[in-house]
Amino acid sequence: MISLSDLRQFKTQGRKFSCLTCYDASMAKGMEVAEIDTILIGDSLGMTIQGHDSTLPVTVADMAYHTAAVRRANQHAFILCDLPFMSYATLNDALVNAKTVMQAGAQMVKIEGGAWLAETVQVLTRNGIPVCVHLGLTPQSVHVFGGYKLQAKTREAADQLIADCKAVVEAGAAILLLECVPAQMGKEIAELFPHVPVIGIGAGADTDGQVLVVQDMLGLTFGKVARFVRNFMTEQTGETAIVDAFKAYHLAVQDKSFPSKEHTFQVEL
């Protein structure tokens, strides 16, 4: 089973690692066969599984249920689990709800925000709960942003993002996840923290790992597809097509052919 120590070693070695969202046992077993390195039980299940138009309705009980299903079927990947909207608004909420999903099978919790999360990160880490902090475009704050938009587009905004990253890393954040930021930012932040793996989604090719929503990379997104999405299913055929798509994604991350420039945001800062 891959551990947090392994991910840190991957970064030191320059070995890119793969991450996919997953919500059920069948997909989790397929990802085990494909040797996907990390799995995120994302609150994206609100849209992909439950049919909502955002992640906001998802509950901690939902997250624990799906985490348990994934863990039963996959003993290979390192498993992260989102704490959903408003489930870590207070320190007590964060501890109680993190305990719930960790006991369900998660090895790390993911929370969204910036420097203001420092105390939460510190308290969770002190209590034996590793934390991934999600920065850049944070879907739980979609109404604050006014939609799903590229973040850190100016040098001032980029410097603020870096300051937020420094604050949560100093508080103990073990992994950073950057979403929808210029490729230059993904590179800068990955290089800034030599011992903290950085996962990207729409953050360029220079982050230490890449994550995609599994439905997106299998071509099951109906409507507008995000720039950073690549359909890995199109070239696969036969009974094992889905597992082969997982393998193709894993290898493309490792050999650095994904993401290519067409899947990244090039902004001069």
Image: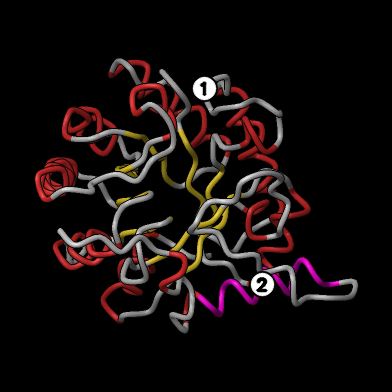
Which quadrant holds residue 188? bottom left
- Of 112 and 201, which appears nearest the observer? 201
Question: At 33% from the left edge and 17% from the top edge, which residue is drawn?
Answer: 89
Which quadrant holds residue 140? top left
Q: Which residues are magenta?
A: 240-252
> Could you tell me the amino acid type at mark 2?
Ala
Question: At 74% from the left edge and 49% from the top edge, which residue is drawn?
Answer: 25
Name the mark nearer the viewer: 2 or 1. Answer: 1
Residue that label 2 marks: 34
Residue 63 position in % (x across, y down): 58, 31
Asked if residue 45 lies left or right of residue 118, the reply is right
Residue situated furthest right in the rendering: 239
Asked if residue 241 lies left or right of residue 248, the reply is right
Mark 2 crowd level (few <14, some 14–19, many ≥20, 10 Å Cα) = many
- Of 184 and 11, which appears nearest the observer? 184
What SS does tag 2 mark? helix
> Could you tell me the amino acid type at mark 1?
Leu
Asked if the magenta segment contains residue 1, the reply would be: no
Residue that label 1 marks: 56
